[in-house]
Image (cartoon, rainbow, N blue to C red):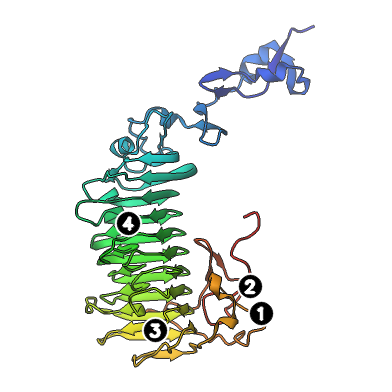
């Protein structure tokens, strides 16, 4: 009878840096065993499995495998390998965000564990970075500190994405301390909050692009009104979607000097006790697509205009304003203007805007104004609580009119709607209503 050897077919695995040969199946795991002649044993042994990394617990206590690249945070990543991850947290090798900003290289992902980071300011100069909070919200509390006397973070790199981080309390001697000062490149802000800064985000000028998604801006500014929740300089392009702007301190909810602006499916509402000036301003004109937004002026505002265009002179070669399917609410007792447009070489196209207030949308403005009805509070589900869904029995249903295309050929039909707080959802059908809300679905989905 030939000699036999027992071989375990489970491939070797690496856990915490220690290799095993699948010996767990030896605990009566008989089906995992094979019997074959000794002579064939050498050929049947599998190759060594690759090293997967160290087992650790994340901020929520869940076991995770940290890639091997994370164990050598100062080493350069391979030319064509996985993204290098730098982990920041109280129990990590890199404990501060400032240290991570100094160590980071182009292409890295920075993961910041949930919690409060007080006075931990930074300047980011790299390209193709992803900086995200993990395990919950990351709160950056300025507490008197600032990077370069400008902001909690200064962004001066290439293509940078920031996710799940809150910026609060920025103050600087120049009185324009920002949560983020964006100076160069392309910046994506996703699921972030900017609260109680002298400026939420402040940008420079030039060939830069800013993209803001599903974020909140509130109580930013100062008492003289020169600061704003969001202040965008003369950059190439601004895109804001699914975001919630409210309660600016005297200044505007959103001010942009960008050459091209996409303000899509947001809520800009000054609300009870709010003292914001304009809710939305394009002081130098440019191309502005304002589609599917809920925009409300409070009863306590000090400025009668809700949307302002061209007030400081037209600086761009193309000046086009597209105001499509917005719900505009003017709660100012003395009245006011939904739209103020200064004279110049420009085009204005306004379709399907729903108006709650004392005046019409067009007050002597040259342009194409189609289907912009005025309504009362009874048209909405609960306007006093900012629920601007149209009642099911309203005659407004099926009165939507196709807005056509922009001068560049872009279809102006809304494709999404804002969902509170700070999100959007797709429309499953062609719009049927004027205004921003097309469905009767509630804002908050139970269990969501």
Q: Residue furthest left?
A: 174
Q: Tell me the SS state at disc 4.
A: strand
Q: Describe residue 164's horizontal placement relative to residue 102 as left or right.
A: right
Can you give x and y, in whole percent of width and height, for residue 394 in the image? 63, 84
Residue that numbered label 1 is attached to = 392
Can you give x and y, in whole percent of width and height, for residue 34 in the image? 74, 19
Q: Tell me the SS state at disc 2.
A: loop
Q: Quadrant of residue 82?
A: top left
Q: Earlier in the sequence, mark 2 or mark 1?
A: 1
Res 440 label:
2
Give the alpha-carbon distance from disc 4 to disc 3, as whole Å: 42 Å
**Which numbered disc, 2 or 3, marks the residue closer to the eye?**
3
**Which numbered disc, 4 or 3, marks the residue closer to the eye?**
3
Look at the numbered discs 2 and 4 and tell me whether their residues touch, using CB distance below 8 Å: no
Q: Earlier in the sequence, mark 1 or mark 3?
A: 3
In this rendering, is residue 168 above or below 93? below
The residue shown at (59%, 18%) is 20
Look at the numbered discs 2 and 1 and tell me whether their residues touch, using CB distance below 8 Å: yes
Give the alpha-carbon distance from disc 1 to disc 3, as whole Å: 31 Å
Question: Callout 2: 10 Å neighbours few (<14), some, many (20+)?
Answer: few
**Which numbered disc, 1 or 4, marks the residue closer to the eye?**
1
Res 334 label:
3
Q: Quadrant of residue 64?
A: top right
Question: Callout 4: 10 Å neighbours few (<14), some, many (20+)?
Answer: many
Q: Residue furthest right?
A: 1
Res 186 label:
4
């Amino acid at each position: 009878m030939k000699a036999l050897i027992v071989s375990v077919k489970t491939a070797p695995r690496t856990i915490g840096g220690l290799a095993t040969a699948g010996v767990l199946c030896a605990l009566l795991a008989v089906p995992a065993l094979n019997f074959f002649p000794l002579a064939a044993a050498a050929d049947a042994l599998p190759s060594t499995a690759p090293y997967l990394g160290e087992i650790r617990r994340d901020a929520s206590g869940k076991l995770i495998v940290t890639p091997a690249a994370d164990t050598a945070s100062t080493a350069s990543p391979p030319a064509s390998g996985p993204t290098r991850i730098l982990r920041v947290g109280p129990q990590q090798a890199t404990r501060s965000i400032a240290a991570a900003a100094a160590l980071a290289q182009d292409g890295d992902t920075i993961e910041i564990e949930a919690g409060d980071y007080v006075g931990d300011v930074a300047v980011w100069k790299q390209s193709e970075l992803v900086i995200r909070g993990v395990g919950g919200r990351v709160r950056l509390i300025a507490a008197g500190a600032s990077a370069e006397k400008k902001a909690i973070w200064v962004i001066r790199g290439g293509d940078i994405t920031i996710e799940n981080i809150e910026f609060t309390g920025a103050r600087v001697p120049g009185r324009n301390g920002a949560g983020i000062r964006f100076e160069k490149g392309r910046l994506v802000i996703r699921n972030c909050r900017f609260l109680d800064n002298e400026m939420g985000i402040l940008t420079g000028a030039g060939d830069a692009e800013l993209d803001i998604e599903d974020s909140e801006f509130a109580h930013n500014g100062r008492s003289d009104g020169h600061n704003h929740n969001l202040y965008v300089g003369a950059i190439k392009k601004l895109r804001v979607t699914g975001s919630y702007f409210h309660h600016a301190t005297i200044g505007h909810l959103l001010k942009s000097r960008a050459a091209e602006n996409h303000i899509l499916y947001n809520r800009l509402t000054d609300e009870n006790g709010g003292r914001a000036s304009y809710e939305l301003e394009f002081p130098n004109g440019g191309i502005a697509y304002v589609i599917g937004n809920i925009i409300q002026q409070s009863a306590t505002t000090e400025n009668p205009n809700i949307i302002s265009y061209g007030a400081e002179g037209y600086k761009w070669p193309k000046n086009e304003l597209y105001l499509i399917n917005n719900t505009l609410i003017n709660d100012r007792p003395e009245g006011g203007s939904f739209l103020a447009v200064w004279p110049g070489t420009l085009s204005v196209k306004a379709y399907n805007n729903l108006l709650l207030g004392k005046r019409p949308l067009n007050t002597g403005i040259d342009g194409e104004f189609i289907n912009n009805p005025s309504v009362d509070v009874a048209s909405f589900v609960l306007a006093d609580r900012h629920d601007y869904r149209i009642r099911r029995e309203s005659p407004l249903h099926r009165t939507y009119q196709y807005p056509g295309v922009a001068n560049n050929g872009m279809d102006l039909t809304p494709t999404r709607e804002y969902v509170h707080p700070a999100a959007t959802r797709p429309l499953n059908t062609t719009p049927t209503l004027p205004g921003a809300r097309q469905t009767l679905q509630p804002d908050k989905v139970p269990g969501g």
